[in-house]
Image (cartoon, rainbow, N blue to C red):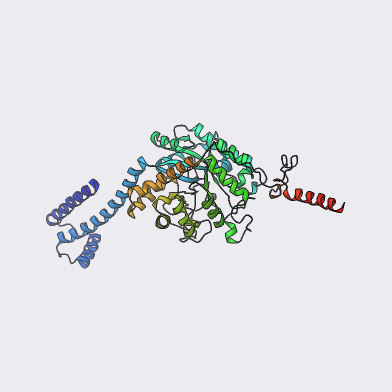
Amino acid sequence: MGRLLAIITWTKDLCSLFCTQSSSLQPRPDPAVQEAARSGQTLHGSTGSRCGDGVMWISWCLWALVAICAGDQFRDEAERIMQETPVIDGHNDLPWQLLTMFNNQLLDEKANLTSLAHTHTNIPKLKAGFVGGQFWSAYTPCDTQNKDAVKRTLEQIDVVHRMCQMYPETFVCVTNSTGIRQAFREGRVASLVGVEGGHSIDSSLGVLRTLYHLGVRYLTLTHSCNTPWADNWLVDTGEDEAQSQGLSEFGQSVVKEMNRLGVIIDLAHVSVATMKAALHLSKAPVVFSHSSAYSLCNHRRNVPDDVLKLVNQTGSLVMVNFYNDYVSCQKEATLSQVADHLDHIKKVAGAGAVGFGGDYDGVSRLPLGLEDVSKYPDLVAELLRRQWTEAEVRGALADNLLRVFEAVEQVSDHTQSPEEQPIPLDKLQGSCRTTYGYSEAPSFHHQPRALLASLTTILLGLCLL
Ligand SMILES: [Zn+2]
């Protein structure tokens, strides 16, 4: 408001100066000023005097300045809020960029995160964007399934840990909500690991538990491929066949074990049947770490309205993806269209269900105005312009994620017995896997059909005798 008053005062001074000068000096008419004055006369019926023309011209400028000033006010307000409540983003693929650009060699000069070029994310951009919490994606593509998925996932977790080690003034690796709040106070980026794709656990509850011990705090149940226990979104486009009709029995064990451990269930990338199965089964709220609203852009990676209602009922969270293809269903998109998704999710699922999951460094096309991680304050300014309350904005920035994370932590119970039932051997594929445990100690659980066949043979044999 102070800036607005200063501009008005300055404009008044300019106006009086203009009037004084035009009456005393009588310079040659400036064609541009004349044109502006003529427009003023036509629109507002101004007096025909030279000073009157000038007043109209200045008035026009004043309104333009007021508009610019008001825009700045929302931006200033956004920064004020974000100083206290920085953004926690649900999904960033910088670790994938570090793998593909530098084979995870952080000591490479070009990999310096302070000056890293050609990426959406680096340290100066994170600071400019008021990023205070980040789920870094430990991602390995679907073609590693049944091959080296676990090894590659471990390497992506390791590179996040090394980021925290190399840049301790910027990043601090944390594993709980208390750690995030502490990082906010220290002005560092709370760094968490999310594993993107159930294939990363290679159908093993033991691997899931070990990932938890390495600090992983969300697991996306699938990437863009089915696992032997959960269906992915391509089932809904008809490109993949449904295998588990959502979650298989083993898939349900995975969800229960994640609840027991305190790993957030992430439903980005899964089929609608998987979304519904997990939302019904999970004892804790879930997240969509990087998905937008299906009814605004009919892409199957997005969340349909009936699922948004379940999100509301379960206190869950949708962290909006900025990828143009999910925002506008076209190659181009704008910041305003991303705000439309935030508005829609707020309308259908409530303000407590909204978050940001930009998918930076994981996508090739980003909206005009949201080109890199430094742009979050512009999106927050747009929400304020759309009359989101301060509490709603703080919710979308961090409070909603913190609420979900705390609920997940409360549901977790490490005194409960772990899930132990392995996936049936016949569900596993791939030639580079051994079968220890299965082949050496077959049991009714492991090979029910084989056991049943043996019993039948024995009984038939007895009858024949
Ligand atoms: Zn993704």
- Could you tell me which residue is drawn at 53 percent across and 35 percent down? 161
Residue lying farthest to the left in this orientation: 24
Q: Nearer the viewer, residue 116 or 324?
A: 324
Give x and y (percent) for residue 62: 23, 55
Q: Quadrant of residue 235?
A: bottom right
Give x and y (percent) for residue 261: 54, 40
Give x and y (percent) for residue 350: 40, 54
- Could you tell me which residue is drawn at 29 percent across and 49 percent down? 73
Residue lying farthest to the right in this orientation: 465
Can residue 116 be seen here? The reply is yes
The total of numbered circles placed on residues is 0
Q: Nearer the viewer, residue 402 or 276?
A: 276
Q: Nearer the viewer, residue 95 or 251?
A: 251
318 vs 427, left or right, is left
Can residue 97 be seen here? The reply is no
431 vs 317, left or right, is right
Give x and y (percent) for residue 116: 49, 40
Q: Is 18 placed above or below 405 here?
A: below
Q: Is 242 placed above or below 431 here?
A: below
Q: Quadrant of residue 50?
A: bottom left
